[in-house]
Amino acid sequence: MNRVFVTAFSVALLALPAIAANAAESTQREPYGIGLEGFSYPYPVSMLPLTNDGEQVRMAYMDAAPAQPNGRVVVLLHGRNFPSSYWAPVIRTLNDAGYRVVVPDQIGFGKSSKPSADLHFDTLARNTVALLDHLQIAKADIVAHSLGGMLGVRIARAYPDRIGHLLLAAPIGLEDYRLYVPPTPTEKILENEDKLTADGYRKQITQPTLFIMGADDHNAPGRPNAPEALRPKMGQNAELAKALAAKMPDANAEVIPNTGHLVFLEAPTKFDELMLAFLAK
């Protein structure tokens, strides 16, 4: 996937009406704003002004400092259907271990601006590095979930000197969805991306990399649009992660049983154990 087309992520689940214990007194909650106005985040939110494709936008982010710093920084990258607030338990775990934790809402998500133009992974990567520059962070580790895993890979490949460790929690993009889903037309494909093979792309990720997968995670974007006969073959994510890790210079895959796509929320104790051991290497 060379480009990601996201205009805004759904906040329908967040905007469910509040139901009082007494049905007669129940009232409907006011809907949240396009920037999740009215929805609280677990840590203070700051805004970074940016320019994307000539449009003025603002990137929301949390910057959580530990009580006893170990001198390390971790950037958390959210998935497509989630605001960065869902990282709250992981932020606490990392803070307790001494890590400063930077948690952006990518442009188009959460409390960040919702631009009129298409979103591109390259733009999101530049925005994330611009945030590191703004915070005067020379190097950080990345912990990324779902779609954030694809972004984390793009950042690690494009800015190898800025990233120490790369932890991919239930990432998507482990298989070539074009083998199953009819292609979506795009205006153009960058020439250098056209020439880069999958094997060449993998070899460009030289940082220590860890996949943490849920054994029951069979998420596969585009599955409903694939021919019915091919749908069962999609989303074998744990096996795909193990196979991919074996082909990378310095990668491993850990699979947590009885766990799905939200691996760090479904199995927090095991996830924290694996994450902290990996980042400490």
Image (cartoon, rainbow, N blue to C red):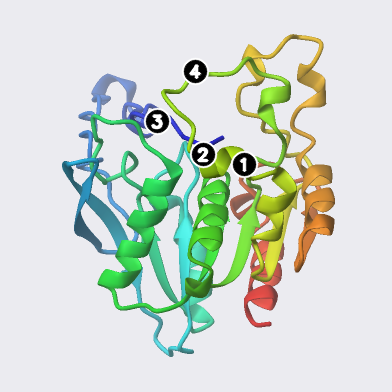
Identified at 53% across, 56% down, the residue is 152
Count the marks: 4
Marks 2 & 4, CB-CB < 8 Å contact: no
| Secondary element at tag 1 | helix
The amino acid type, in three-letter code, at marker 3 is Val
Marks 3/2: CA distance? 23 Å
Q: Which quadrant holds residue 224?
A: top right
Judge the density around disc 4: few (<14), some (14-19), many (≥20) Cα neighbours within 10 Å. Answer: few
Residue placed under numbered mark 3 in the picture? 6
Please report whichever mark, 1 or 3, sits nearer to the chain's N-terminal start: 3
Query: Visible in this render: residue 114?
Result: yes
Marks 4/1: CA distance? 19 Å
Instruction: Say the numbered circle drawn on residue 185.
Output: 4
Marks 2 & 1, CB-CB < 8 Å contact: yes
Residue placed under numbered mark 2 in the picture? 191
The percent position of residue 253, horizontal first and vertical second, equals: 78, 58
Marks 2/1: CA distance? 6 Å
The amino acid type, in three-letter code, at marker 2 is Glu
The percent position of residue 112, horizontal first and vertical second, equals: 26, 46
Judge the density around disc 1: few (<14), some (14-19), many (≥20) Cα neighbours within 10 Å. Answer: few
Marks 3/4: CA distance? 15 Å
Residue placed under numbered mark 1 in the picture? 195
The amino acid type, in three-letter code, at marker 1 is Lys
